[in-house]
Amino acid sequence: MQSTITVKGQATLPKPVRDHLGLKPGDRVKFFIHPDGTVVMLPMRPASSLRGILKRAGQKPITIEKMDEAIAQEVCERDERSTRQ
């Protein structure tokens, strides 16, 4: 696949590329230039699009309170370990 650069520096992405990346009109993309000279284009996604990707089958989501308890417990354990040394 190929595209032509216009005098304004614009190019049309071929439909198979837009479909593969799930791009729609108005979506934004980000470009990365690698040291070897290759350029990678990735769609920019809002953080909300990541919601739920780490769910495990049959497990309930962990509450904020449970997270806070686990953090507090780890801090206490680290403090105890550091005072023993």
Image (cartoon, rainbow, N blue to C red):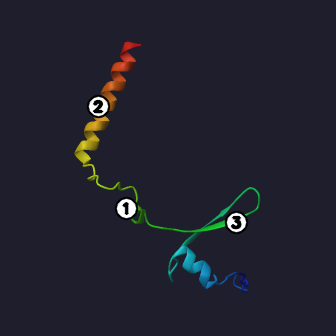
| Left or right of residue 56, residue 7 in this image | right
Q: Quadrant of residue 49?
A: bottom left
Give the amino acid at mark 3. Answer: Val
Measuring 40% from the left and 60% from the top, which residue is drawn there?
Answer: 53
Measuring 28% from the left and 53% from the top, which residue is drawn there?
Answer: 61
Rendered image: mark on residue 51: 1
Percent coordinates x, y for residue 72 in the rendering: 28, 34
Where disc 2 sits, the SS reads helix
What's the CA distance linking mark 3 and mark 2? Answer: 45 Å
What's the CA distance linking mark 1 and mark 2? Answer: 27 Å
What's the CA distance linking mark 1 and mark 3? Answer: 28 Å
Residue that numbered label 2 is attached to: 73
Percent coordinates x, y for residue 76 in the rendering: 30, 26
Measuring 52% from the left and 78% from the top, which residue is drawn there?
Answer: 23
Residue 38 or residue 19, whichever sits in front: 19
Residue that numbered label 3 is attached to: 39
Where disc 1 sits, the SS reads loop
Percent coordinates x, y for residue 74 in the rendering: 33, 31
